[in-house]
Structures are given as C-alpha cells and as structure tokens.
Amino acid sequence: KYLQEDGVSEDCKKLLSTLPKEKGWIGSYIYNYQGFWTSPRLIQGVIACQQQFQAQNSDIILVTTPKSGTTWLKALLFSLVNRKKYPIFEQNHPLLVKNPHDLVPFLELKLYVDGQVPDFSSFTPPRIMSTHLPYDSLPKSVQDSRTKLVYLCRNPRDTFISMWHFTNNLRLDYIDTNSIEEMFDHFCKGVSLYGPFWNHVLDYWGKRIEKPKKVIFLMYEEIKEKPTIQLKRLAEFLEFPFSIEEENCGVIDEILRMCSFDNLSNLDVNINGKLSTGEETKMFFRRGEVGDWKHYFTLEMREKLNHIIKQKFHGSGLNF
Ligand code: A3P
C-alpha cells in the first residue's frame, strides 16, 4: 500500500516530479517534502491534513519518529485518557480486542490518507490522534490551538534497526529486501522515514522549552526504565493526573501491565489481526527491547553513528 506512486493523483505526481528523491525504504523511491523524507502515497495525506484538519483545544496528538514505540505510547495514551470511560480493570477493555493503531489513528497515514475526508463524528473529546510530522509541517490549527503534543523518540541505533526490519517486512511480499549496509548509509545521510532523524528530534526537543504547556518530550528508554514516573509525568502534563485513590488501587500498574509488550503482543488481535488499513498487526511487535542494535552493528557502524550523533546533538543536552 505504501509502496508505489500508482495510487497518487495527477497533481501529486506533478509535485513529486519536482522533489528530490532517493531509493526508498519500502517502495522504489522516497521523496523530500518540506525538508523531510517520506513515501509518495503519504505526501497526499500530508497535504490533505495540512489543508483540512481543524484542531480542537482539547485534542491530544502523539508525535513520533517512526519505530520509536508509537504503538506502545498509543496504548498508554488511550488507556490513560479514557480510564473513566473504559476502566482499566474491566474485561472488555478496547485494547484487548483492537490494535492501538485502530484506537489512535494517524492523521496523514490513516485519516487523510489518499486525500480522503475523514469522519470525526465517532470521536468524543479529548480526541487522541497521531502523526510523524515535524513541527513546522503540522497543520496550522494544531500549531495555533491549545492542542497538546506528546512527543516520543528512541535511541537512533535501535530506531534504525527497528525501521530496517519493519520496512523489509513490508517489502517482502512485493520485492527484495534492503541490505543493512545500504539502509544504514541512508539513515546516516538523513534519508530515513520522516528523517533526518536528528532534525525531527531536535525540532521537538527545542519546542518543549519554547512551549512547555504544549509539548512534552518522552523517551522510549526512560519509559522502560522508570515507567511509573514517566506515566505520572504524562498524566500531569495532559491534565489527567492520577488521584491518590487510583494510585493506591494499582491503576498505574495495571495500565502499564495492560500496555506492556508481553501483554499486547500475546493478544489474538495482535497475533492474527490486521489493521483497518490492511497491515498485519504482528508487524508492530518485534522484540521491544533496549539495545537490540548491539546484535547488528559492526564496529565500523558503531563508530560512524557515534560520530554523527556527537556532531548533531552537540550542545543540545540530548545524549544517546
Ligand atoms: P523493535 O523493532 O525494536 O522490537 P512503532 O510502534 O513506533 O512502530 O515502534 C515499533 C517498536 O516498538 C518495535 O521495536 C516494537 O517491538 C516496539 N514495541 C511495540 N509495542 C511495544 C510495547 N508495548 N512496549 C515496548 N515496545 C514496544
């Protein structure tokens, strides 16, 4: 689906012909639009949502670099924000029967994909949605409203390995796979999905200082290490803090258990299911660990990425 240019409109094809392009991670090519790299079919969705999406002050939008743990954060956000409507201890919780991507839809990848007009009638506030867009490419109304942005990033080494596996899985049914060496060079040049990775991360890292009420910056590794602290921090930022009673009743622990890799990846919906957009749900659960990159990187790859990370994040206060 994300692959070729077949499905895109004539206008979009015209636009594509003017954009820089490189060999794709999933399809034949990846294009640079507004400074970030993305697949041809998604550019249509990006333009449609930039032109049409009307944000509400109560909206919550999860922004991530692809493969940084979006599925996990969608589950956490959904269960956190909807815990009155869907009590976390109940047997019929939506997360038990639906994949997080179907509960928290992407703007450009789902709601506006192919330039379609979404129906928001079934959404009740606060609406929770997600995107991979850099800040300046977000719809104007998102930037100008009091919409909250929850940003998630992950160590670039693990993000790269996860992206390489994921995109090769998507390619498998159609074409050959991409070698790790080739895609590593691409990643290092900044040519990754919604990359350059460093630009994406630094963009929101800066925004969290500029707009502390609007942007919270979360890291995959920090949530893994101190899940309770990070979930409480998120709840407070969203103005849905946990009460003492909730804490005492184990609501936080139960949300974390429900959304854990072990629990979600063993549910039937995430083993045998498909998303409403067609992808197999099991693709979003691979290992879910910190440091898996160590099983793949050569010494040369380590040194090259270390050097780039040092250079790109120098003086930012961000350490990977
Ligand atoms: P790995 O490929 O390293 O295993 P995204 O959701 O942004 O597409 O990111 C996918 C990555 O998050 C995959 O990483 C996946 O295994 C991991 N993941 C999915 N669900 C998770 C969960 N509940 N907890 C921790 N990691 C999870």
Image: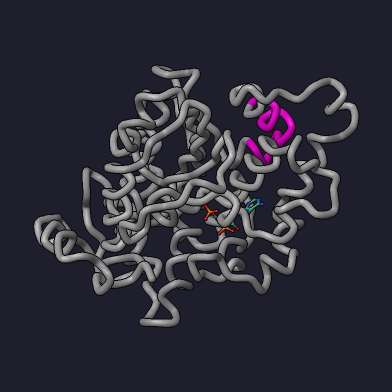
Q: Is residue 266 above or below residue 247?
A: below
Residue positioned 32% across, 61% down in the render: 114
Q: Is residue 229 above or below residue 196?
A: above
In the image, 80: left or right of 291?
right
Q: In front here: 77 or 48?
A: 48
* Horizontal and vertical percent position of residue 69: 56, 49
* Horizontal and vertical percent position of residue 27: 31, 70
* Horizontal and vertical percent position of residue 71: 58, 52
Q: In front here: 18 or 274?
A: 274
Q: How many marks?
A: 0
Q: Quadrant of ligand 1?
A: bottom right
Please identify the residue farthest to the right as the structure is shown.
249
What stretch of residues is rendered in magenta?
A: 223-233
Residue positioned 29% across, 34% down in the render: 136
In the image, 307: left or right of 21?
right
In the image, 307: left or right of 51?
right
For residue 62: magenta?
A: no
Q: Is residue 227 above or below residue 168?
A: above
Name which quarter of the figure residue 253 lies in.
top right
For residue 226: magenta?
A: yes
* Horizontal and vertical percent position of residue 87: 80, 41
